[in-house]
Amino acid sequence: MSTLSTHVLDLVSGKPAAGMAISLWAGHECLFRGVTNVDGRCPELGQTTGDMQAGSYRLEFAVADYFRTRDVALSDPPFLDVVPIAFGMAQVAPGEKGGHYHVPLLVSPYGFSTYRGS
């Protein structure tokens, strides 16, 4: 079993992306919907999902809606609307480290980056 967290940084302002809607999916099933806090994190994600099974998942970040609420000029349609990050959680043996998955997002209206954090 593994746990999950995320953190979103707004590269336009250089600050945490407070108020960005996110959702977690397993296939076509939505497991979680929430909004980032003032630190760009969504602690409810880990609290709601708890221990997660090994498998394939997708985090979706409502990037265009977030930048619109900050009066950032976007193209029509926006270059990035919803950013999906598809990732896999591997099976972790009991007592073995590596059961926490942190999926940060660094984002602007025209690009993003992610990695497996700690």
Image: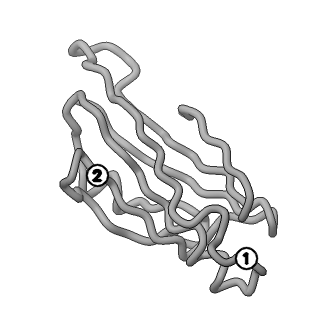
Q: State the scheme by which the image is colored.
A: one colour
SS type, badge 1: loop
Left or right: where 33 falls relative to 5: left
x and y, in percent, of residue 4 in the image: 37, 43
**Residue 115 vs residue 48, the one in the foreground:** 115
Q: Which mark is residue 25?
A: 2
Give the image quarter of residue 15.
Answer: bottom right
Query: Furthest-front residue in view?
Result: 76
x and y, in percent, of residue 63 in the image: 58, 67
x and y, in percent, of residue 64 in the image: 60, 72
Q: Which mark is residue 74?
A: 1
Left or right: where 109 falls relative to 1: right
**Residue 20 vs residue 76, the one in the foreground:** 76
Three-letter amino acid code at disc 1?
Leu
Dot in front, 2 or 1: 1
Ranked by sequence position, the earlier of labels 2 and 1 is 2
Report, in whole angstroms, how far the alpha carbon at label 2 lies from the one at label 1.
27 Å
x and y, in percent, of residue 3 in the image: 32, 39
> Can you say whether 73 is above or below 107 in the image?
below
Give the image quarter of residue 110.
Answer: bottom right
SS type, badge 2: strand
Instruction: Count the marks.
Output: 2
> Can you say whether 83 is above or below 70 in the image?
above
Three-letter amino acid code at disc 2?
Trp
Residue at coordinates 73% horizontally, 76% vertically from top-left?
74
Left or right: where 23 falls relative to 62: left
Q: Quadrant of the C terminus?
A: top right
Verify CB contact (< 8 Å) between mark 2 and mark 1. no
Q: Quadrant of the N terminus?
A: top left
Residue at coordinates 32% horizontally, 67% vertically from top-left?
33
Few, some or many residues within 10 Å of mark 1 (<14, 14–19, 20+) = some
